[in-house]
Every structure is written in structure tokens, then in C-alpha cells.
Image: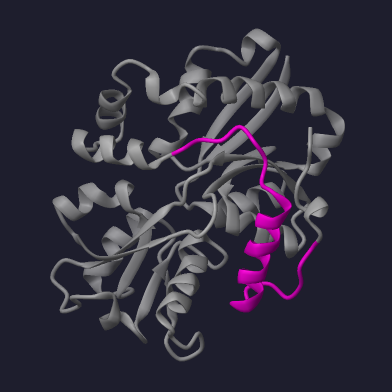
């Protein structure tokens, strides 16, 4: 049995992994694939890949490309979710902020530097024409739980996180949604440490074939909407809306998409240099 450890956020996007692991589909192929939840998101997973704590990650596209440009020795082997991630822009429900414009110059609560919540604060600022130096400030709160505690206490003025994951906290407090910021590219990719790719590409290929077989037909699984609603504490109507907006993928990023994402990161001064696509992508 070959052992692999994969990391990801404990959110509805990753339910296909839970289903394939539950059904022991990897074990049937001689692969002991174990899942590790990363509540801290992309920054925590990138760190775990660097430190060889995990072999693979289902991770935000812009976050892992930035980390590869900064020396993380891993490669993107496939897009996992093709559609954009819709980042909700949240404030404390009792705050005076009524619109995204009110947040100019205020402090963004982020899980960590280099995380998706950090990078997307820059993307949002760019979209709104804010000055990256004077109009952005950051407060590290570690994860969603940290933001739920922090914003009502004044640690950070707003928090960006996936809209549907945070919807229960908008419906029931302590958040209020004031805006949205979709990623301008496919949101989740699968990244693998290069050492693992070199040592056992066949097992990685098998893992991808199994997960792709599930995601290709994921929306047609009977009562999948109810399963998601129950498992992730979501309203059924919200889950159905999310499913209508979400498309999984079985292909890798295109070289042009890699170039465009790097160019955006470069313009936002989040990387110092770009890499050729073949230094970021791996074809198995």
C-alpha cells in the first residue's frame, strides 16, 4: 500500500474527496490516501507542502502560483474547480460600514500573509482603484473562526471568505455581507510536491482518475444538494444556487491562464518575478 497525504479546506467544494475516501476507492487501487483539513486555508497548505508535511493539496490557484514563484518546489497537476470563487466581503453586523466603499483605508482581517484572503484583498483593492499602500491594512486572525471572534472585537474591519461557506454567519450573525469579489480565474487546483511526482507519477495519475470520475458526475448524484446542506450547515436554496454556479474540471490550467495570473500578481507586487508555465504546471 502506497501512502499519500492530501490537504484541503473543510468546505463543500471538497465533498467529492470525502465520497471517494468513504467508498475506499483509492484503497482498491493499492493507495492509502489520507485527508487533512486545513482551517487556515491556502497559506497553511502552502507551508505544509514546503515542509513536506503533506504530499498534495487542493488549493487556491493564485495562492499556490504565488508560492511556487517564491520557491515552493511543487507543481499544479490539474484544475479542480473551473469556476471562479465568489469571495464575500463581510463586516461585523453591528458596524457602521454599509458598502465596500466604506472600507477604503480600513483593516482587512486575513488568515495569514500569502493566504487567499490576503491576496484577494489586493485584487479587490485593484478592482476599486484603491491605493495598495495607503488604502490597505491587515490584521492576521488565522482562520474563519478567528474572524468570527475578531471582527466583533474590532480586530479587523472586514473579512473576505468564500460567500457560501460564510452564509450561515450572515444569516445568523455575527457577519453582514457588503459586497462580493469573484476570482478572475479558475479557483481551485491540485498541487503536488515535485519529489512525489518524480517518485511515483503513476499513483498520482490514479488518484486524479478516481477523483475526476466522481467530479464529472457530481451534480447528478441523487440528493447531493441535501447531503451538502446537512453536512455543511447550509440552506437548501443556497446549496442549489452554489451548485448552479460551480463547475469542476478534469483538465490542467492553460499556459495563458498561468501567464495572466502571474501578471496580475506582479502588478499587485505580490511576486517579484514570473516563471514559464512549464515550471508551474506538470503533465502526468
Which one is nearer the viewer's eye here, 182 or 32? 182
- Which image quarter: residue 192? top right
Q: Position of residue 74 (x, y in %)?
A: 75, 48
Q: Residue at x 27, y 35 (%)?
A: 240
Where in the figure is residue 89, as x and y percent of width and height?
32, 65
Outermost residue toward the right in this view: 198
- Horizontal relation, residue 161 to residue 112: left or right: left
Q: Quick one: 261 or 256, which is closer to the camera?
A: 256
Point out the stretch of residues depicted in magenta.
247-275
Is 51 located above or below residue 21 in the figure?
Answer: below
Quarter location, residue 105: bottom left
At 63% from the left and 62% from the top, the residue drawn is: 261
- Quadrant housing the N terminus: top right
Which color scheme does this rendered protein use?
Answer: one colour
Q: Quadrant of the C terminus?
A: top right
Question: Quick check: 17 above or below 180?
Answer: above
Residue 256 versus residue 94 in the image, above or below: above
In the rendered image, the vertical position of residue 207 relative to residue 238, given as above or below: above
Residue sitting nearer the eye, 135 or 256: 256
Amino acid at each position: 500500500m502506497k501512502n499519500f497525504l492530501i490537504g484541503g479546506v473543510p468546505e463543500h467544494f471538497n465533498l467529492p474527496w470525502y465520497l471517494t475516501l468513504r467508498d475506499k476507492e483509492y484503497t482498491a487501487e493499492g493507495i492509502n490516501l489520507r485527508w487533512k483539513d486545513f482551517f487556515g486555508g491556502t497559506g497553511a497548505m502552502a507551508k505544509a507542502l514546503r515542509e513536506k508535511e503533506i504530499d498534495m493539496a487542493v488549493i487556491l490557484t493564485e495562492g499556490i502560483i504565488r508560492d511556487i514563484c517564491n520557491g515552493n518546489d511543487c507543481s499544479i497537476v490539474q484544475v479542480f474547480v473551473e469556476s471562479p470563487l465568489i469571495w464575500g466581503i463581510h463586516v461585523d453586523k453591528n458596524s457602521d460600514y454599509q458598502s465596500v466603499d466604506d472600507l477604503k483605508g480600513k483593516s482587512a482581517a486575513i488568515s495569514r500573509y500569502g493566504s487567499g484572503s490576503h491576496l484577494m484583498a489586493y485584487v479587490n483593492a485593484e478592482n476599486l482603484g484603491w491605493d495598495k499602500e495607503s488604502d490597505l491594512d491587515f490584521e492576521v486572525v488565522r482562520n474563519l473562526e478567528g474572524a468570527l471572534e475578531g471582527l466583533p472585537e474590532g480586530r479587523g474591519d472586514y473579512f473576505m471568505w468564500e460567500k457560501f461557506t460564510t452564509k450561515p454567519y450572515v444569516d445568523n450573525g455575527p457577519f453582514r455581507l457588503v459586497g462580493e469579489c469573484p476570482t478572475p480565474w479558475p479557483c481551485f487546483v491540485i498541487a503536488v510536491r515535485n519529489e512525489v511526482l518524480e517518485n511515483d507519477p503513476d499513483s498520482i495519475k490514479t488518484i486524479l482518475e478516481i477523483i475526476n470520475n466522481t467530479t464529472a458526475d457530481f451534480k447528478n448524484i441523487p440528493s447531493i444538494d441535501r447531503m451538502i446542506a446537512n453536512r455543511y450547515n447550509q440552506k437548501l436554496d443556497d446549496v442549489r444556487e452554489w451548485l448552479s454556479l460551480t463547475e469542476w474540471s478534469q483538465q490542467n490550467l492553460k499556459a495563458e491562464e498561468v501567464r495572466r495570473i502571474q501578471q496580475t500578481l506582479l502588478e499587485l507586487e505580490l511576486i517579484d518575478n514570473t516563471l514559464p508555465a512549464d515550471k508551474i504546471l506538470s503533465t502526468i
